[in-house]
Image (cartoon, rainbow, N blue to C red):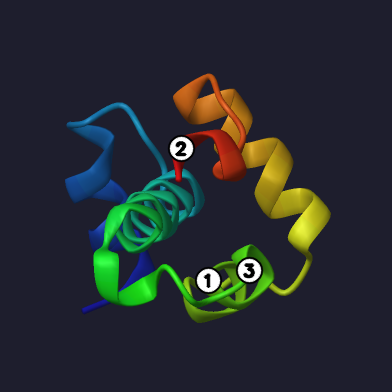
């Protein structure tokens, strides 16, 4: 599968590859924040496990996407 082919498939959704990957990472993090077995994990650890290397960037993206901070979603 070539990058061009992936972009063609994603163009139907109106999002590029980067935006789609970000969305999937944020959805994974949101699911982990509400998962009872993840309550003992720090938000920074959830961010890292969801593919974010910068917790500040994660917090900004999360708030922009879901309208609340990760702590508020927990």
Residue annotated with mark 2: 73
For the point 42% across and 68% down, the residue is: 39
Left or right relative to 28: residue 19: right
Q: Position of residue 73 (x, y in %)?
A: 46, 37
* Contact? badges 2 and 1 (CB < 8 Å): no
> Which residue is nearer to you in this view: 37 or 55?
37
Residue annotated with mark 3: 52
Sequence-wise first label, 2 or 1: 1
For the point 39% across and 46% down, the residue is: 23
Locate residue 5: give its quadrant: bottom left
Q: Nearer the viewer, mark 3 or mark 1?
A: 1
Mark 3 vs mark 2, CA separation in Å: 17 Å
Q: Which mark is residue 16?
A: none
Q: Position of residue 17 (x, y in %)?
A: 41, 53
* Contact? badges 3 and 2 (CB < 8 Å): no
Locate residue 33: give its quadrant: bottom left
- How many other residues sit within 10 Å of disc 1, few (<14), some (14-19) or many (≥20)? many
Residue annotated with mark 1: 46
């Amino acid at each position: 599968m070539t990058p061009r082919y992936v972009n063609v498939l994603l163009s139907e959704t109106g999002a590029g590859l980067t935006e789609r990957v970000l969305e999937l990472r944020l959805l994974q993090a949101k699911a982990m924040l509400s998962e009872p077995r993840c309550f003992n994990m720090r938000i920074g650890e959830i961010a890292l496990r969801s593919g974010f290397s910068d917790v500040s960037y994660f917090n900004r993206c999360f708030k922009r996407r879901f309208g609340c901070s990760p702590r508020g979603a927990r």
